Amino acid sequence: MPVTKVQPFVHADSELVKGWKNRIILHRFQLLIASSLILMIFLVLGIGLGVGLSCVGKVRCGSSSQCVSAMAQCDGTMDCENHEDELGCVRLSGRSSVLQVQKRGEWRTVCSEEWSNQLGISACKQLGYSRYVESSFISLTSIEQDLQTNLISINYSQAEVIKLQSAATFSKNHCNSGMVTTLRCIECGSRPQYKSRIVGGNISKPGQFPWQVSLHFQREHICGGSIVTSSWILTAAHCVFGFDNASLWTVHAGLTEQLINGARSLAVERIVRHAQYRQKELDYDVALMRLQEPLVFDGFVEPICLPNYGEEFTEGRMCWISGWGTTKENGESSVVLRSATIPLISTKTCNQADVYKGLISPWMICAGYLEGGIDACQGDSGGPLACEDSSVWKLVGVTSWGTGCAEVNKPGVYARVTKALSWIRLQIEREEV
Ligand SMILES: *[C@@H]1O[C@H](CO)[C@@H](O)[C@H](O)[C@H]1NC(C)=O
Ligand SMILES: *[C@@H]1O[C@H](CO)[C@@H](O)[C@H](O)[C@H]1NC(C)=O
Ligand SMILES: *[C@@H]1O[C@H](CO)[C@@H](O)[C@H](O)[C@H]1NC(C)=O
């Protein structure tokens, strides 16, 4: 029975899911006829009005009905009414955060020649950051094979580059310098106030998980979340589903104990839930909260790094979960921030018949022990599944659901952040640019 790890509301009811599925099968025939009828009506209407039903061979502009050619995507000219065709044109890829620019619908790795800090600032803006830390260059041959083939350099002749894709000139198959560009926009994933020697149990120390926040709905802890930039918190869609009135939420950062006065409480300006999230399937279980005032990073409050595009996190790798969730199923939520280290589980293992039997989609990642015992539980939803990578912490998952808590063969299921990356970047870029 998939149960979201939120408290106290929204329990996905598997009987409902089953009932719904059965009804679908029962009425499949009628549905088939009905949907073909509807389809025909739409087709006739569509052809009649001269608009295609889908953007066949083309790309849709956001959620509007406008379509543009794939070649118009990231070509430096705004073709969509709301400029969606020029969003999401930059990404960081692979282990080393290699910069890639999309030009006319194709992703290309950026050579180091003619690169400058000014371009770095522009690139970070397009990634949704108002900050810029540094650019550095690494040998083309040291990066992942699939990032080595399609290359591009940026011709920086304009005084100020607005969008990288408009300055990207030629596609090429080698870099003159033999080097490619890597980028860092934000100091993230570090724990400057945490002394690892004092860890003694499962109660977290101040600064141990500085990116962890507590999300309060009407002054009560409901879910966890992770700081990804000074203005944005990543959480689970099911935490805010039906509760998207931003003024009823507050974000509490830099605390290990609930109820403590003085922890920074921040007002929420806007909540963005993934449009494809459905309560019954629990896929696309991510949402973003934009804060009214930006956070100040001080060691007890710090952002966690998002992983890069194409980064893999393999089975058996030990990562951390944290939260104020209940310490047993149907228990009360915890006053202190608790944490545990658990191994990642591959989707193949997690989809086995005796585990989740095919319920795990590409948008989910499992972590925990098949023998049970340690798991996230109610109230931990939305919080981080964080993995340390050469002393930089990366957000790999968002606590989503599970059957019970810590039961045998029922590990925790998390929204997979590498899948959600382009959605996250798009929401932030749209708002910040
Ligand atoms: C760079 O751009 C300028 C003007 O946009 C152009 O004149 C110049 O030929 C370009 N340089 C290269 C190497 O493409
Ligand atoms: C959100 O909640 C506030 C405070 O209760 C209320 O004043 C406001 O009308 C609500 N907004 C919406 C859109 O429901
Ligand atoms: C909790 O603390 C105990 C005692 O220090 C330790 O044996 C155990 O491994 C810890 N559990 C986790 C999940 O870190």
Image (tube, helix red, strand yellow):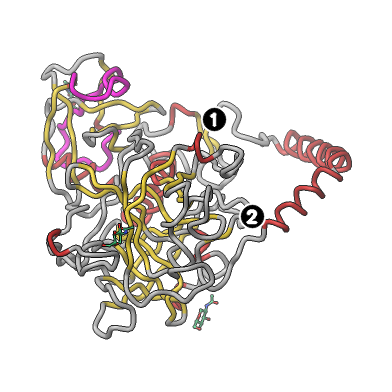
Foreground residue, 236 or 245?
236
Residue under circle 2? 280
Pick the residue in front: 157 or 421: 421
The secondary structure type at the circle numbered 1 is strand
Name the image quarter holding residue 259: bottom left
In front: 121, or 406? 406
Determine the residue positioned at 73% across, 52% down.
18
Residue 58 is tagged as: 1
Image coords of residue 132 (percent x, y): 16, 49
**Residue under the point 85% across and 42% down:** 34
Residue interval drawn in magenta: 141-166
- What whole-number distance in Å separates the C-alpha atoms at marks 2 and 1? 31 Å
Quadrant (top left/top right/bottom left/bottom right) for the N terminus? bottom right
Question: Of marks 2 and 1, which one's residue comes earlier in the chain?
Answer: 1
User: Residue 150: horizontal and vertical position, in percent?
Assistant: 30, 19
Q: Position of residue 220 (x, y in %)?
A: 44, 80
Q: Residue at x 38, y 70 (%)?
A: 324
